[in-house]
Amino acid sequence: MTTFNRRTLLLTGGVLLAGAASATGYSLWGGMSEEEARPFYTEDGVALRVTDPVAYFTESEPTPGSAEFAADWNGATWHFASAENRDQFLADPEAYAPQFGGFCAWAVAEKGELYSTDPTAWKIVDDKLYLNFNAGIQKKWEKDIPGFIKAADNRWPDILAEAQAS
């Protein structure tokens, strides 16, 4: 398995520094909340490999987005299948954006590392979107979803701080 490319993470610019500061209780970049300051996994600046994040919730499946319905949020460009989905996302992005910056939920929990994700390896748990590296890793994650979510939630601030330091 390959881990994320630090350059990809850093495409989010100062967002990473703000995330680390927010996780430690400091406020940077105009007082962004911790949620707003989290970096997102992108390819060429586009989140979710051009997959519409709202469609996971409304269509119950990964759905390709289109540059025609793109929006910028939190240091990444997000593509949507429709203007309606884009507008729904922009009204409450934290409700639709994937957890752990769109990085693999299992890798964050189990390894404390950031792995890229496959948009087809996903699950919504308690109204939150989680992505995994691939279907095989997702099967591992599904063996203890609550435990992995708890572990990942605990590790996430340290991962942000470590990424910021490198």
Image (cartoon, helix red, strand yellow):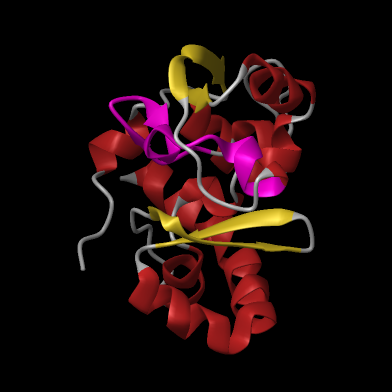
- Side of 11 where 5 appears, left or right: left
Residue 81 percent across, percent down from the top left: 54, 26
Question: Which image quadrant for residue 8?
Answer: top left
Up/down of 66 relative to 155, above or below = above
- Which residues are drawn in magenta? 39-57
Residue 110 percent across, percent down from the top left: 45, 78
Residue at image position (51%, 73%) is: 109
Residue at image position (50%, 37%) is: 39
Residue 123 percent across, percent down from the top left: 60, 63
Q: How many tags in the picture? A: 0
Can you say which quadrant of the picture contains the C terminus? top left
Up/down of 33 relative to 149, above or below = above
Q: Which residue is at the front of the view, 63 or 158?
A: 63
Q: Which residue is at the front of the view, 31 or 72?
A: 72
Q: Which residue is at the front of the view, 92 or 84?
A: 84
**Which residue reaches farthest top?**
68
Q: Is residue 160 magenta?
A: no
**Which residue reaches farthest left?**
2
Q: Is residue 116 visible?
A: yes
Can you say which quadrant of the picture contains the N terminus? bottom left
Q: Is residue 54 magenta?
A: yes
Residue 127 percent across, percent down from the top left: 77, 55
Q: Is residue 14 visible?
A: no
Up/down of 79 relative to 99, above or below = above
Residue at image position (48%, 35%) is: 16
